[in-house]
Image (spheres, rainbow, N blue to C red):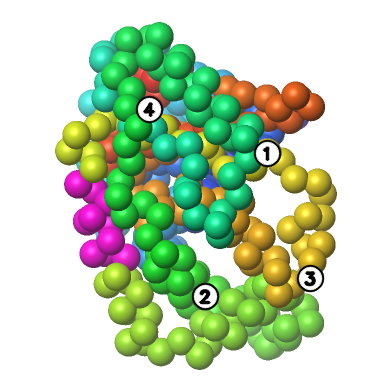
Amino acid sequence: MVPVAHANDGGGSIRIPASECGLVGLKPTRGRVSQGPLIGEAWAGGTIDGSLARTVRDFAGVFDVISQRMPGEPYYAPPLPRPPSQEVGADPGRLRIGVVDHAGDERFLDDPQCRAAVTAAARLLESLGHDVAQSWPAAMFEYEFTSHFTAIIAADAEATFRAFEAALGRPISDAEIEPRNAAHREAGRTLGSVEYLQARQWIGQWARRMATWWDDFDLLLTPTLGAPPPELGWFTAAGPRVEGRRIASFIPYSAQFNMTGPPAVSLPLHCTPDDLPVGVQLVAAHGREDVLVRVAR
């Protein structure tokens, strides 16, 4: 066991294990942590590096170090007012916080324990003096998002495997990789350049619809996941054709903020009656990790 560990996040992969393991996991703002010198952006800017930690203090200390700028980035996050570690213990002031506890869509899991986690967190935030209301970005659960997000992943997966093949000096067969990755490769291989650019264009227009919500709120509170930790093997138990749908059903609240870019943190604030950890997610406006660190602490 270690105090902190590297993690990265393209659709929730910092916040997901944080929720599953009772840890703190913050996905920084897009462009905050450099992917240089070899990479400008991946997954259309959706991926970013960070860490998992047992405490907000430890995460903030790592964040101080990894959030340094490098020259030649495709874009830069807005500068923070001071090092994140100096936000630990700072007064966040009185914040406007919107709450959503379920996606309202049959594609996604909606476990009562995740709703209970959000209810308890909302009460806690109210007790700390914040203004809490049922509200969330109207575009957050738009049906078309998933297909465009998946197209971007598929194109990036094929490009990544081609890079591996170049390094190995030989082709990689489908038999050597997981069936879901083989399916992503095939989708990426057959995706046309125009279709790829259209997916990115749709995401760009959707991100603008998402962004307007932050004009009236400082934070969004959601469950981190759609359900508590599943039994080992649940994702693959029904076969490779169902695996992707099961994964998607489990993560209704995370990938949206990879594609829009604001910072989001999962906090270990709830346990099921069986003592399984359930995280809650707080999302701040673009570039406002300082607010997240203050509130999370």
Q: In this view, does 154 lie above or below 74?
A: below
- Distance between the Cα atoms at labels 1 and 2? 28 Å
- Tag 4 secondary structure: helix
Task: Determine which residue is flagged by label 1.
Answer: 228
Q: Which amino acid does label 2 sit on?
A: Ala
Q: Which of marks 4 and 3 is in front?
A: 3
Q: In this view, does 153 lie to the left or right of 202?
A: right
Task: Determine which residue is flagged by label 2.
Answer: 154
Q: Which of the marked residues, 4 or 3, is nearer the chain's N terminus?
A: 3
Cβ–Cβ under 8 Å for marks 4 and 2? no
Q: 161 or 130: which is nearer to us?
A: 130
**Image quarter of residue 195:** bottom left
Task: Determine which residue is flagged by label 3.
Answer: 239
Residue at 79% of width from left, 27% of height from top? 274
Instruction: Answer yes or no: is residue 107 visible.
Output: yes
Q: 70 or 79: which is nearer to us?
A: 79
Q: Which span is picked out in magenta?
A: 203-212
- Distance between the Cα atoms at labels 4 and 3? 39 Å
